[in-house]
Image: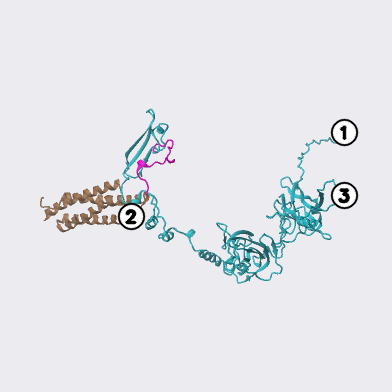
Chain colours: A cyan, B brown
Amino acid sequence: ETRAASRARPRSGPAPVTDVAQLCVCDLLVAQCDVNCCCDPDCSAADFSLFTACSVPIVTGDSHLCSQKAALYSLDVEANPPERIFKVIDHTNPSVFCIHAANYEQALSFSSPTMPTAENFDLLLKQFGSAAFSAEPGSWNMNIDAENSSDGNETYRYEYGVPIQTVDAFLSLPSPVVSSWCSDANPAGFLVNQATKCTRSVSVEKCGDIQAVNMLFYINSSILAVPKSSQMVNITVQSIAVQSPNGIKTLVNGSDGLRLPMILDGLCINIVLGVSYHITYTDAGEIIEAAAAFVLGAINKEALSIQQSFEISFTQVNTEAVPLSGNPGYVVGLPIRAGFQPQGYPFPVEVFAAFSTNKYNQFTILQSTSNQDCLAAQGARTPILFGYNMISGCKLRIPSAMKCQPLSQTLLDLLKGQNFPEYVASFGNSQAQDVLDWVPITHLHTSEQRISNPFQSSCQIPVAFELEVKWTKYGSLVNPQARIVNVTARITTTPLKQLPSGRERTIPVTSSVVFTDISSPAEPGYKAWPTINVKLPFDFFFPFV
Amino acid sequence: SSSQLSSVPLQMLFYVHGVYDIFYFLATLAMILYKSQVFSYPDGFLAPDLTLLCILAILEALRLHLGSKGNLTEEEAPLGISLVMTVGSVLLAMYFLVWQTYVLKADVILNALLLALLGLEAMLKLMAIAAFV
């Protein structure tokens, strides 16, 4: 019943206090005495005896009034102990223009604003709202059109940051707005490379109904090649990768059209977990190609939400995006560039393909997974970033009857990865043609075998893979550039002892990358002392020499 | 000499009142301007005050003219009308004394003087009408 009552009459703020005897500006501590505040009601006579002065000597009403009440506070320091004197007097304004009476209630104080309620909200919004509170986003589009139409017969083109337009609206890159839930209203800006991750609520029952997990939703709108034109660019499906529940992504061969969500065995499959747009543009600001690479996954009955990740990147037509890792020295955090040398010249690394297991197709290290089983974690690798020491590992469970040689080969592949390179670029911008700029990887092999049984040549399995990258500072003292000098790959093996059947062992396998700075300290050099180079001419003492 | 029925004090009062009215009108206008600048004086309150001041000025001018004419021509009719208009002036003066939006001390003084003059005038007009009739 209190809610009904409060809804009936509009609430307003508390009425202002006007009695001067009760106003106290210096009373800031609740239920505690403020120091030197003579008007504080929480202070006792004992507290007053400790004060030295009154911070607020007089409290009056509006001084424009002809006659008003004033509360005077002062300390009588003559008395022992000092005590506070409080008087309420009538204070008169001697001016002839003082206010004798005011028939207008809000004349001398601020008006309390009306509290917005459900009934008067629209009225207040109309009265006080302005462009900042306008609730129609459509009005923004009208302004943009008005501005652009005044440009006349200009050819349109996309500029940096301009939202990419599609047939009906903008190309949206779903992103988290206030919370982590996806909002589909974030337009993608031209030449703005973005990557976002957000959460989407799903359920297996509404498998086919949720638009946002359906591939069609992301490719059915065509992009306008230039703003406000009728030339359209369709979004093609570049690749589809299917992600298994434990995180392994597999590329699907031959994109055979769209894969729409459907229910299979109690799981909802083909739901979109990630989209990566690649837009190709010309230097005239026109989009000529758009491709999307998808990651599809499956959810089961217990899943209530999934995390989707979105990415957009732009490439200029007829260029190859070879990302450099530094110019010229390596930048900390950028991947190390590596390559091969078949018959003569090392290749630069290829342009990355979306959603292959190691993104940059080059120097990678094993990535630890949550289940820590070496043989199950096929393919999870992470690129080696310059300056970041990494260590990762897994546990190898060896059943007793495992053959050593295939196990050794499998582990080696696991530790080194596919396409283990032979050369590493010594500078971040080393070109393939400069053979001398590439450093060969040295391989070392150490064995944990104890020397006790040199004749028992049991087969060795690799258990540790260490990469040591030695780098030095190169160039001027004020702006040193990082340069890789030496890369050593050391594989440590241990003999596999055959155990009686039925028993199973677990050995840890580690791989690590260490960056060592071997730059020699700079030696200060001093200029030579200036010498006075004075030589008398040959025939100075002519007549005598 | 005593066949003159026109009241000399009344005429003198009319003259003084005329001068005072000019001063009163200018002073009240200036004070309303001052109040509108210094205090919060919304338009809804300013308009009635200014309107009534203009009405008072016109009323006073008319009243003094009719009264003076009636007194000098020794006619009761204009003097009677002037007496009735005095009532209106008194009401307006009361408004400016009590019900104005802001009543300053100077307002009180001016309007009190105006009321005193009006009261004196009313008495003298009655006596003059009585003498003319």
Examine the structure image and report whether residue B123 is included in the region drawn in magenta: no
Labels 2 & 1 near each other (Cβ < 8 A): no
The disc placed on residue A542 is 1
Q: Hey, what amino acid is under mark 2? A: Phe
Label 3 and label 1: CA atoms lie apart by 94 Å
Instruction: Give the quadrant of the C terminus of chain A.
Output: top right
Examine the rendering and report whether any part of residue A414 can be seen: yes
Left or right placement of residue A316 versus residue B72 in this view: right
Would residue A33 be counted in the magenta stretch?
yes
Quarter occupied by the N terminus of chain A: bottom left
Image quadrant in which you'd find residue A325? bottom right
**For residue B45, which numbered disc appears in the image?**
2
The residues bearing labels 2 and 1 have C-alpha atoms spaced at a distance of: 117 Å
Front residue (pair A143, B4): A143
**Left-right relation of A400 to A191:** right
Q: Amino acid at mark 1?
A: Phe
- The residue singled out by tag 3 in the image is A455
Which range is magenta?
A15-40
Q: Specify the subunit that label 2 lies on.
A: B
The amino acid type found where label 3 is placed reads Phe
* Label 3 chain ID: A
Report whether mark 2 lies on the same chain as mark 3: no
| Disc 3 and disc 1 on one polypeptide chain | yes
Q: Residues within 10 Å of mark 1 (few under 14, many from 20)?
A: few
Look at the numbered disc 1 and give the secondary structure of its residue. loop
Describe the element under mark 3 as helix, strand or loop: loop
